[in-house]
Image (spheres, rainbow, N blue to C red):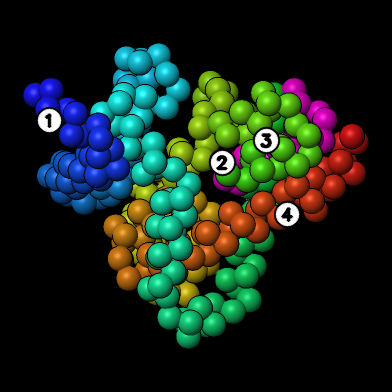
Amino acid sequence: MDAIISVLEKNGLVTAFAVIGILMYFSYVISKKLTRGRVHGSAIAIILGLVLAYFGGITTGGDKGLADLSIFAGIGIMGGAMLRDLAIIATAFGVHLEEVKKAGLSGILSLFVGIASSFLIGVLIALAFGYTDAASLATIGAGTTTYIVGPVTGAAVGASSEVIALSIAAGLIKAILIMIAAGLIKAILIMIATPFIAKYIGLNNPRSAIVYGGLMGSTSGVAGGLAATDPKLVPYGAMTATFYTGLGCLLAPSILFLAVRAVFGA
């Protein structure tokens, strides 16, 4: 057993791929057997991953979840920005430019509408919790856009570390008004809801997938939701959802921050 553990520790990234592969397998089995495919396997995998990360953190007292355990250290690399960005970019290779051109102005507008509406909701949430300075409002507003845009904006406008942390955990449970991890909850909700609402909003072609990705903004959520709806639509929704994050990183610390400061002052 010690020899096996030693081999797994020395080949951390390979171990990580094996662990994630097994987790994904069971997630899709659960999706198929218990939900008949209505809750996508990706959403179940994220929930199971959170549970494992929680217990990993409790066991080690660390802050990296399972990656704090030496045998699972490779998960920290596999789940890092490098492979994440590679996976996101790779989805674009399934896109046909002719279909992208058909989206035209509606595809572009969906990005701006999606960012502006999420940002506004975040600002209102921040106001409800007593924040009044422009830097805090803009940072938390950016956090509801995506959990990536929040820290980028906070660092750019000089927000406090506490506010930047809140931007990552920006959201609202209406019943008890408790801040939750909006970026992740949003992704899971999108994954679960997309297959149910697809037929009602005409989400059955590349053009609508492009617009949907721009409005929702969560790459993981959009990709998982579209995979459960129609795998052929995944690259189109993921492409604009990726642009959403990049555009948010440009708009939130600049135009949107200046707008908030003009209204609420420095």
> Disc 4 or 1, which lies upstream in sequence?
1
Q: Residue at x 79, y 39 (%)?
A: 157
From the top left corner, tell me how far across and down residue 209 is, in percent: 45, 67
| Disc 3, SS | helix
Q: Which residue is mark 2?
A: 147
Answer with the quarter of the image where residue 66 lies. top left
- Cα separation, mark 4 vs mark 2, equals 15 Å
Q: Circle 1 sits on which residue? A: 4
In primary-sequence order, the first of circles 4 and 2 is 2
Q: Which residue is mark 4?
A: 251
Label 1 is placed on what type of residue? Ile
Disc 3 crowd rating (10 Å Cα; few below 14, some 14-19, many 20+) is many
Residue 140: mark: 3
> Marks 1 and 3: CB-CB under 8 Å?
no
Q: Is residue 262 above or below residue 130?
A: below
Residue 132: tell me if it is visible. yes
Q: Is residue 109 magenta?
A: no
Of 177 and 144, nearer the camera is 144
Q: Residue at x 30, y 26 (%)?
A: 70
Nearest to the eye among marks 1 and 2: give it.
Answer: 1
Residue 174 visible: no
- Residue at the spot 75% in from the left edge and 23% down from the top edge: 130
Q: Main secondary structure of the magenta part?
A: helix
